[in-house]
Image (spheres, grey):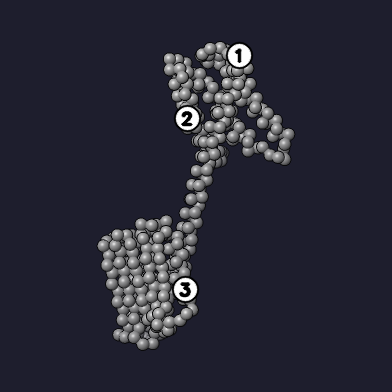
């Protein structure tokens, strides 16, 4: 069974040989258009020889050359020096003898004929070698690109596998608190959690989803969180979207909302609040989440939790033009996300 790489190399020569033939045919036809039918057979005869010789040279001989086998490598090179000079002349002579190749133009000496054919053969080596090098270079870049995409997708899946359980763990903690207090709101919280679970299981497998679906989940999550607090909690969620069907990677925004409740509101003693604003215009997304905290402003750098860290890495993999900023204020925390949705990596 042939290797895939061998098949790919053979496919290269399927179009490379006709291209070499046509290139030489055009050149000869320009010089002598009157004998075009004969030129076709002449070039075909020569190209058959050179194509086989170049295929053997580049695919079988050159890969075997090694400094450790210096003598064998020397004799291989010497063999091809013969093949592309005197051997090529013998092939042309055989064509003349079999009445396949028709000599055109003025007769010249054997030495000049061999020199002419050697130059032709060296030109074929350059043509096959350069095109083969470019072909391998392009294939290598494509393979590297495919590997990079596969690696990024695997990392994205890993980040999601971290973020989703983390999100569910925090949500289950909220329900546990209600159940422990024997709250009548526990059944409602379980119902809302089931909707979130259904969404995560059946709607987030693809790379994109309509923004309106993510908005519903954010609404459900906010409602689920509000069940834990009394009327002192103020939540303002507004959005301005020119198209509710605008596509977005699923669950991309929820970590900022979750962070506001988990690490902000839950630690606020007085007048807890969360302000959320989302807008998408001309493929420019702006998402800001501002929440109360239990800490005053400090000079220390804000420490990012797993949700924010994963979000930042996902943005690096998904987009080339984005900005995620977090700012610790006086008993407030603000996260701002800007994305050029047209800059998908």
Q: Position of residue 315 (x, y in %)?
A: 43, 63
Q: Position of residue 291 (x, y in %)?
A: 36, 78
Residue in the image at 47% along x and 54% along y: 149
100 in relation to 60, above or below: above
Tell me which numbered mark, 3 or 1, is placed earlier along the sequence: 1
Q: Nearer the viewer, residue 127 or 308?
A: 127
Tell me which numbered mark, 1 or 2, is placed earlier along the sequence: 2
Q: Position of residue 70 (x, y in %)?
A: 72, 36
Label 2 sits on a secondary structure element that is helix
Q: Is residue 278 left or right of residue 312?
A: left
Label 1 sits on a secondary structure element that is loop
Q: Which residue is mark 1?
A: 109
Q: Nearer the viewer, residue 267 or 303?
A: 303
Q: In the drawing, what numbered circle is on residue 149?
A: none
Q: Which residue is mark 2?
A: 19
For the residue carrying disc 3, how many other residues have a C-alpha within 10 Å: few (<14), some (14-19), or many (20+)?
few
Tell me which numbered mark, 2 or 3, is placed earlier along the sequence: 2
Q: Which residue is mark 3?
A: 304
340 in relation to 140, above or below: below
């Amino acid at each position: 069974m042939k290797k895939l790489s061998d098949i790919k190399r053979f496919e290269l020569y399927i179009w490379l040989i006709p291209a070499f033939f046509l290139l030489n045919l055009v050149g000869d036809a320009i010089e002598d258009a009157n004998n075009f039918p004969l030129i076709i057979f002449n070039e075909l005869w020569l190209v058959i020889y050179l194509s086989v010789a170049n295929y053997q040279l580049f695919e079988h001989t050159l890969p075997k050359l090694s400094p450790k086998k210096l003598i064998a490598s020397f004799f291989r090179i010497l063999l091809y020096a013969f093949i592309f000079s005197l051997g090529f002349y013998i092939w042309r002579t055989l064509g003349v003898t079999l009445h396949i190749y028709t000599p055109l133009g003025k007769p010249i000496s054997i030495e000049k004929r061999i020199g002419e054919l050697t130059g032709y053969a060296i030109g074929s080596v350059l043509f096959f070698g350069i095109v083969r090098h470019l072909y391998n270079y392009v294939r290598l870049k494509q393979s590297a690109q495919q590997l990079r995409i596969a690696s990024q997708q695997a990392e994205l899946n890993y980040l999601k596998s971290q973020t989703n359980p983390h999100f569910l763990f925090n949500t289950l903690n909220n329900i546990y608190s209600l159940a422990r207090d024997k709250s009548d709101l526990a059944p409602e919280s379980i119902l809302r959690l089931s909707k979130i679970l259904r969404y995560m299981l059946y709607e987030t497998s693809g790379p994109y989803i309509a923004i309106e679906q993510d908005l519903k989940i954010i609404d459900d999550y906010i409602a689920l969180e509000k069940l834990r607090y009394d009327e002192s909690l103020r939540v303002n969620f507004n959005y301005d979207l020119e198209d509710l069907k605008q596509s977005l990677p699923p669950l991309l925004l929820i970590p900022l909302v979750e962070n506001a409740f988990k690490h902000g509101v839950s630690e606020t003693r007085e007048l807890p609040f969360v302000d959320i604003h989302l807008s998408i215009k001309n493929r420019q997304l702006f998402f800001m989440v501002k929440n109360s905290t239990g800490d005053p402003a400090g000079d220390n750098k804000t420490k990012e939790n797993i949700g924010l860290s994963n979000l930042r890495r996902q943005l690096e993999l998904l987009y080339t033009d984005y900005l995620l900023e977090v700012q610790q204020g006086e008993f407030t925390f603000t996260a701002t996300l800007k994305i050029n949705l047209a800059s998908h990596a």
